[in-house]
Image: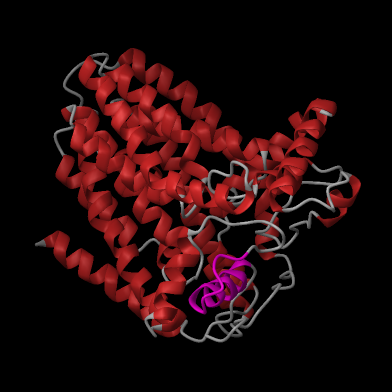
Amino acid sequence: MRLWLLILAALAVRLAGVAAAWDIDCAYDECFYGNLAHQLADGEGFQPHARHYWPPGYIAYLAGHLKLGLGLGGARVTQAFLSTLLVPMIFLLGRQAARDAGRPDGERVGMAAALLVAFHPTLVAYAHYLWSETLFLTLFTGALLLIHTARMRASGPLALAAGLAMGASCLVKVLPLYLVPLLAVWVIAGTPTRRGVRVAVLLMAGTMAVILPWTARNYAAYGRLVLIETTTGKNLVRGNNPVAPSNWDWGTGRSTRGVVLQAGCQDADLVDLDACLTRYGVEQIIQHPLRFVTRAGTKVADLVNPTSFLVRHIRRGLYGDWPPPLAHGAVTVIALFNMALMALAVWGWTRHGGAWWQLTVIMVLYTLAVHVVTFGMSRFRLPLMPVLVVGAVMAVLPWRATTPRRPRRHRQMIWATVILAILLVCWGARVPDLYAPPSPPGLSGWPGGG
């Protein structure tokens, strides 16, 4: 009963946010998503944006609402329900993680984690932003739950369902695509039997079953292999160009136009342009290894910085002209919330073990690797939000181990201290920007109508 009341409260908060932001202007990718969705709904097919293709999932999601006459506002309402689904999902994740760690209070951990997600300011805000994160996070979290359960039970059907959910999330954001093989190895390592191998194979098969029809469509269109999209080269260049990494949180994102000319890629079609920029980005890393290493710190600071797109919207006045004390106060609360969540998650997950701890380590290292190679931004850590929330809750809620844990406590203190020191350095480099004058909002207003 308590969980149902929490779900209803979370939905009410999100729907209230949708109502309050019904006429909010779009910014950056929101505008492009809206335009591409209108083109798709009007029968023009999937069109490129700025000479590259994005994954088709979110554009199709918006276009479906337009085709049904629900408009982009209707897509926001649907997202409120999708975002609310995270509440019971995180309850299950928290309960599983506590049991994995040998804690007897799985229900309590699950409820506390669900409560945190229900009123998480960034997740509430994303429910009314027309960015792909809400749809992606719901699919991705569902896939993680299914993968964990399939591994525990050595269940082939659950593994296949996990793969289908993971494949669907890849069509919304391509980030998990290369995480799937790592998860398959994790399954086999935990269950080194024929049943474990079967679970891993079905996980990968389910993922590719969703992706390959789109890949076949791309091959028919271009005559070359394009698994999902063509943004790899652009993202490599944005993090490894001669000037500086992009930082869209602060409005310093850099266009690839100059690099396209410098690299001699300007006459290429969409697929060849991506390949050309990818080669150029890799060459920049190989030819300038010291620059790549020194920039890694900047990219990690951008990834973990305590801002969010909610802060960005407040600073730019997209929610209206707030008095400076109110705006600064809201930004401070959001930033402190984000810092506390990350710090407590470090303590919680270095203190606990189990399968979810292993999954968390894999996901964190994978996320860091991807964004050190490309570029960092606060939005990119959202896939980690489920495990960050659960880790934070397990750090806060007291528990008593049933076996002596002295050696682990010693290692816990060392790892937690090192990671928290890194986070403090990263935050110290970014906190002043929270209160700097807002940068230009980029595009605003909905192209193609609302």
Name the residue rendered at 50%, 59% in the picture: 56
Name the residue rendered at 29%, 41% in the picture: 162
Residue 36 is left or right of residue 285, and the answer is left
Depth check, front residue: 62 or 4: 62
Place residue 402 in its image quadrant: top left
8 inside magenta stretch:
no
Residue 6 is left or right of residue 340, and the answer is left
- Say if residue 399 shows up in the picture: no
Place residue 50 in its image quadrant: bottom right
Name the residue rendered at 53%, 55% in the picture: 55
Depth check, front residue: 337 or 91: 91
* Coloring scheme used: secondary structure
Name the residue rendered at 41%, 68% in the picture: 127
The furthest residue to the left: 1
Q: Residue 209: give x, y in percent of width and height.
A: 36, 42
Magenta part of the chain: 29-47
Quarter of the image that includes the N terminus: bottom left
Q: Residue 68: give x, y in percent of width and height.
A: 37, 81
The furthest residue to the right: 262
Q: Is residue 355 above or below residue 68?
A: above
Classified by dominant secondary structure, the portion drawn in magenta counts as: helix
33 inside magenta stretch:
yes
Depth check, front residue: 15 or 353: 15
Place residue 28 in its image quadrant: bottom right
Q: Is residue 326 above or below residue 385?
A: below
Residue 93 is left or right of residue 382, and the answer is left
How many labels sit on residues? 0
- Say if residue 214 shows up in the picture: yes
Residue 229 is left or right of residue 130, and the answer is right
Q: Is residue 44 above or below residue 323?
A: above
Q: Residue 408: give x, y in percent of width and height.
A: 35, 17
Q: Residue 93: give x, y in percent of width and height.
A: 26, 43
